[in-house]
Image: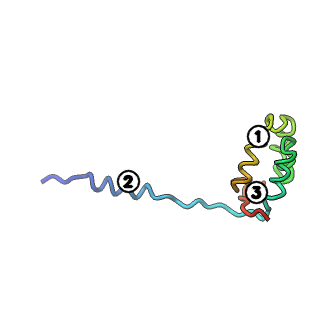
Amino acid sequence: MTSDPLPATIEFVEKQAEPQPVAFKKSERKILIPFLLCFLIGFLGVHRFYLGQWKAGFLQLITLGGLTAWQAMDAVKLAAREFNDRDGNRMVDWW
């Protein structure tokens, strides 16, 4: 009698495929003001300065928002609620 190792392998793969919840801390900052700053004058990095991200703000300032590409990416991330404040906490509330 030979045992078939296939069912045990399938069971192991199914256990590994379960999605894990993504844990993040919720920021007390709201999205509306940084989004408006990013949309209007984001090429100057003002929204990054507002959120306390001084290094990224300075880089956006001297590159004009990465020739506005960086500004556009930040606006999309803010609208999608995928942007973090300076402490790494996710901003999820608009107001």
Looking at the image, which is closer to me, 59 or 79? Answer: 79
**What is the quadrant of the N terminus in the image?**
bottom left
Q: Is residue 65 above or below residue 32?
A: above
Question: Residue drawn at (74%, 64%), measured in percent from left and top?
Answer: 93
Q: Is residue 7 left or right of residue 30?
A: left
To which residue does mark 2 refer? 13
Labels 1, 3: front one: 1
Asked where in the image residue 60 lies, by quadrant, the reply is top right
Amino acid carrying mark 3 in the image = Asp
Can you say which quadrant of the picture contains the C terminus?
A: bottom right
Q: Which residue is mark 1?
A: 70
- As measured in the structure, the alpha-carbon distance from the residue carrying label 1 to the one carrying label 3 is 20 Å
Closer to the chain start, of discs 2 and 3, is: 2
Q: At 85% from the left edge and 36% from the top edge, which residue is drawn?
A: 64
Q: Secondary structure at mark 2?
A: helix
Q: Secondary structure at mark 3?
A: loop
Which badge, 1 or 3, is on the more N-terminal residue?
1
> Is the Cβ of the residue at disc 2 closer than 8 Å to that at disc 3?
no
Above or below, 63 against 90 in this view is: above
x and y, in percent, of residue 76 in the image: 72, 48
User: Can you give x and y, in whole percent of width and height, for residue 14 in the image?
Assistant: 38, 56
